[in-house]
Amino acid sequence: MRRLNHFIDGQNVSGTSGRFGDLFDPNTGAVQGQVPLADISEIATAVAAARAAFPAWAAQNPQRRARVMFEFKRLVEANMDDLAALLSSEHGKVIADSRGDIQRGLDVVEFAAGIPHLQKGEFTENAGPGIDVYSMRQPLGVCAGITPFNFPAMIPCWMAAVAIACGNTFILKPSEKTPSVPLRLAELMLQAGAPAGVFNVVNGDKVAVDAILHHPDIKAVSFVGSSDIAQYVYATGAAHGKRVQAMGGAKNHGIILPDADMDQVVRDIVGAAFGSAGERCMALPVAVPVGKNTADEFVARMQDAIAGLKVGISTDAQAQFGPVVSAAHRDRIARYVQMGVDEGAELVVDGRGLELQGHENGFFIGPSLFDHVTPDMQSYRDEIFGPVLQVVRAETLAQATHLATAHQYGNGVAIFTRSGRAAREFAARVDVGMVGINVPIPVPVSYHSFGGWKRSAFGDTNQHGPDGVRFWTRIKTVTERWPDGDIGDQAFVIPTMG
Ligand code: NAD
C-alpha cells in the first residue's frame, strides 16, 4: 500500500503526526494508500522552509521566475499521461477530463510566465518640481493555498503558479482525497528550477488548515472548496491579519429561451450537467426552460440524451463519466435524489442503484433528471455536486433571471438564445459572477479572472488573470526628489544584464 509524504524544502518528508487518512480508488472502492495528516509542527516546518527561501526568490529578476514557469509547463506536458492516470485513479473522473484538468492548470502557468510584464509598476515623471512617483508590485512573503478534491491540478496551479511567479514562496494544503498530483506538481516545480522551499505541499485536514490560518508568518491564503468552510477560512484568516480570498460552492442555472438552438442546448447541457459526474463548481445542474413548449421539448430530448450516456471506470475511453469521489459523497447525492422525490419534484430519470459489473464496490451513481422542481425545495437551494439535473420551469425571461439572481450561490450562469438583445440585457442584470451566452460552462480563460458572487466567493479578488497578480502582490509607491548638483559624466552607469 502506498504511503504518501509531504513535500517540504525540496524533499519528500514522512508525516510525523501519527495521523493518516485513507486514500481510495473510486473505481473499486478499495483503499489504495494512506495520506499523512499534518499537525501544527509540520505546518511550522514548512513555513520555516518557505520563509528561508523567500528573500532570494523574491530578489530573482522576473524573467528568471518566468523561465521556471516555461520549464514547469514543459515538464508537466512531458508527464501528462502519468499525471492524468494518477489523477483519475484518486478522483474517478475519466482520463479525458483529467487531461483537461491538467491543461486548464497549464493555461494559468502560461499566463504566469508573462510575469515580467504583469508585475510592472507605474511611473509618473514630474509629479511636482523635480519629483517623480513610481509604484512597484512586490510579493507578500510566505503564502498558502487550500484546495478542494475536484480539480487537483487546475486549482493548485491557479494559486501556486501566479503566487510563485510573483516572487512569493508557497505552501499548498491539497484535498486529502486527491493529494498525489499536487505532490507531483511541487516536485516538477523544483525540477523546473524553483529553489527548495519555494513550493511546499503539506497534506492534512482541518488541523492543518487551522494551523495555516493561525500562523503569523503566512501573509495570504487562497481557498477553494465548499461555502461554509470558505466563509470560515475567510473570517478566521482575516481575523489573523491575512489577506484571504475564499471561493465556495455553486448552483449554476442554464436559461433556455424559446428561440435557442435546441440541438446545441441538449448537447451542451448533457456535458455540463453530467460531465465529471457533476463534480464541478461550474457544472450546470439547473436548467430553466422558458415557456411550456420549450420545457416539454427540453425534458423529452434530455431524457433521450441521458439514455445514451455511458458511466464507466475512469480508464474506459467510451465512458462519459466515472465514479464520484467517495462512498459518502455517492450516498449524499442519493439522499438528495430522494429528497427531491419527497419534496414533490418529478423524477424523470433515476440514477440511483447503478452497479458496474466487476466494480460493484465502486462509487458509481448514474445520471438523474428532475422536472417540475420549484425554488422553495431544499434539493434546489442546496448544492448537490453530483450527476443530477433539475428542471425549473419559468414563464418569462424575467422570472428565469430572478431565479439565478435570488439563489444563494452566484458562481456561473448560462443563457441559450439567438437574441442578442435578450442575452445582453440578461448579462447586465443577473446577480452572478460568470456569465455564458450560448456557452454552458463559462470558465474565463487564464488571462481573465475567475470568481463568483454571493456565497460562491468571499473576499475582493478573483483567481488568476489580473486579479491573481493583484492578490499575490502588494503595491509600494515611491515619491522621489533628488538634490540639485552638478552631474558629471561618471554619474551615468548603464547596468549590464544579469
Ligand atoms: P471541502 O470544503 O470539503 O474541502 C476543501 C478544503 O477544505 C480541503 O482542502 C479540505 O481538507 C479542507 N477542509 C475540509 N473540512 C474543513 C474544515 N472543517 N475546516 C477547515 N478546512 C476544511 O470541499 P471539497 O468537497 O473538497 O470540494 C467541493 C466543493 O468545492 C464544492 O462545494 C464545490 O462547489 C467547491 N468548488 C468551488 C470552486 C470555485 O471556484 N468556486 C471550484 C472548485 C470546487
Image: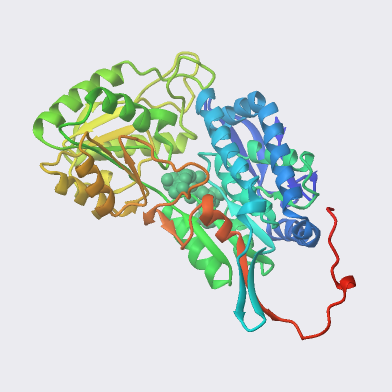
- Name the residue furthest bottom: 484
Residue 340 picture location, percent across and down? 24, 38
In which quadrant of the rendered view does residue 56 lie?
A: bottom right
| Colour scheme | rainbow
Q: Residue at x 45, y 18 (%)?
A: 319
- What residue is at 37 percent from the left and 27 percent from the top? 271
Left or right of 17? Residue 440 is left
Q: Residue at x 56, y 40 (%)?
A: 154
Residue for point 68% across, 50% down: 202
Question: Which is more toward the observer, 372 or 394?
Answer: 394
Rendered location of residue 249, percent (x, y): 40, 49
In the rendered image, which quarter contains the N terminus?
top right
The location of residue 456, given as percent across then percent down, is 39, 53
Is residue 362 in view from this perspective? yes
Say whether residue 204 is visible: no
**354 versus 17 height, above or below:** above
The residue sitting at the right extreme is 490
Q: Position of residue 185 (x, y in %)?
A: 68, 39
Q: Nearer the viewer, residue 59 or 390?
A: 59
Snapshot quadrant of residue 298: top left
Q: Is residue 211 above or below residue 62?
A: below
